[in-house]
Amino acid sequence: MNFVHLHNHTLFSVLDGIASPENYFQACADRKWPAFAVTEHGILNSIPDCYFASKETGVKFIPGCEFYYCDLEPFRRRIIEEGGKVSDLKIKVPGIYDRIRKNRHLTILCKNQEGYQNVLKMNMIAWEQGFYYRPRIWMDLLEQHSKGLIILSGCLNGPVSRELLAGNLKSKGIITGARDYVKKFKKIFKDDFYVELQMPNINIGTDETPIHDSIIFEGLTKLADEFKIKTIITADCHYLNRDDYEIQKVMMAIDQNLAIDDPSLFHSNSNEQYLKSREQLRQTFDNELYHNVFDSNSFEKSCDNTLEVADKCESFKPDLGPKLPVIKNEDFANKELIRLTLKGLQEKGLDKDDKKYLTMDGLKVTYKEQMMIELERFITKGFASYFLIMRDLVLHSTKTLNWPIGPGRGSAGGSLVCYLLGIHYLDPIKIGLSFDRMLSASRGGWMLDVAMPKE
């Protein structure tokens, strides 16, 4: 029977997920599932691989992200902007320091191209402005970039589930915080907000007060009924098969620098987070702990709702071309490239060398003539910004950070301009390297030494 997994991690969730995008999409194709969503932890770098795996298998790719979420992130940023220290809150405001450090998880899917652009924007802001232990988003940011998104309430570490857990630990049932989150998400996203039922069948809570996750499951279903919100089943897949659980546990131990049997190792302690079929999911819920709150009809509806979500998501082609910064004043960039290259020629004493050298490209040229040939070609093809920025990166790495770099790589070693700018340390005239191999006059395209996958 059809089913769509909407919360999944590939090996791009480093030392957490272990299956490749290609393996996931092929497994979905073998089972004739129509779509598959990928939601890495706070990153989007698996999108190119997933896109090409989708094209290869015919399984629709739904881009998404499991964002780190914290309501108090704007408060933390304001403290820093005012010159304060977040750690001071340990003394000044008891309890708030721990709340600021807490990162909840929120599952976000791209419904269309606009949603994809909004996820890209939020991810950039999360890393640039919201980074505190993790790249984080917050409610106001989410509301500002809400168009084109489908929101799931998240895993057991989601904001709604954690409020439910806190309420049960305090014996208060469904507390106000969980309702407030659901009401807010429902108001912003309307029918594109779903309650995520993700039950790996484990005990949570504290050592003193262990709580089976079915208690949170019950709270989530009650909230869904109260606010008339549809539920969906997710498996939070981190691996393909149940037997892969031990591999994932080893990887998480490596990530945390702990022994695999260390009691402090953070792990779900469940081997249920694999790519289950609908029947295998049904068996997971064939448990007396769930029977009172989730009957067979509810289970089937929650599975069918994953197909509804997949149908809402449009197939589209993400822009996978390399993104390079550009100096907007092209005339300035061209003149600056010429100035710095000529300066490099003079500093190396090569501007006085009038000897003609035979290059591998079959030309007899002086250093200055070869420099002008390369500059003319780079400027004509619009590469001035590229080389100026590359020079900045290399000089910052070597001069400021004292990072060692190699003498040069690939066909770029054939460029005299790169040598004069300090991008590499190889004199191509003396060694006899070919500049045309790097960038011939007839070469189309705009990237130099970067190979992109073919569609």
Image (cartoon, rainbow, N blue to C red):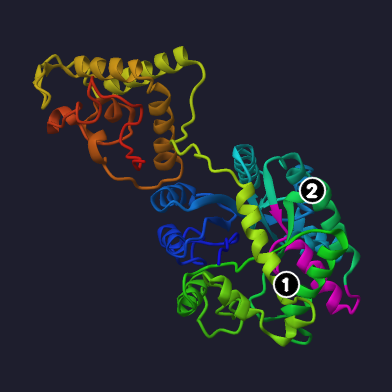
Kind of residue sitting beneath label 2: Lys
The nearer-to-camera label among 2 and 1 is 1
The structure residue drawn at horizontal position 46% and vertical position 65%, both measured from the top left corner, is 31
The percent coordinates of residue 335 (x first, y second) are 41, 13
Res 110 label: none
Above or below for 57 versus 288: above
Above or below for 362 versus 256: above
Q: How many marks?
A: 2
Residue 93 seen in this snapshot: no
Kind of residue sitting beneath label 1: Asn
The percent coordinates of residue 133 (x first, y second) are 64, 58
- SS for dot 2: helix
Above or below for 213 versus 151: below
Image marks 2 and 1: residues in contact by CB distance under 8 Å: no
Instruction: From the image, tell me which residue sits under label 2.
Output: 190
Which residues are the magenta region? 151-173
Does residue 166 belong to the magenta stretch? yes
Does residue 96 belong to the magenta stretch? no
Badge 2 or badge 1: first in the primary sequence: 2
The percent coordinates of residue 82 (x first, y second) are 79, 43
- In the rendered view of the protein, which quadrant contains the N terminus? bottom right
Q: On the rendered structure, is 349 left or right of 379? A: left
Q: Measure the C-alpha gap from mark 2 to mark 1.
A: 24 Å
The structure residue drawn at horizontal position 59% and vertical position 38%, both measured from the top left corner, is 113
The percent coordinates of residue 188 (x first, y second) are 80, 46
Instruction: From the image, tell me which residue sits under label 1.
Output: 297
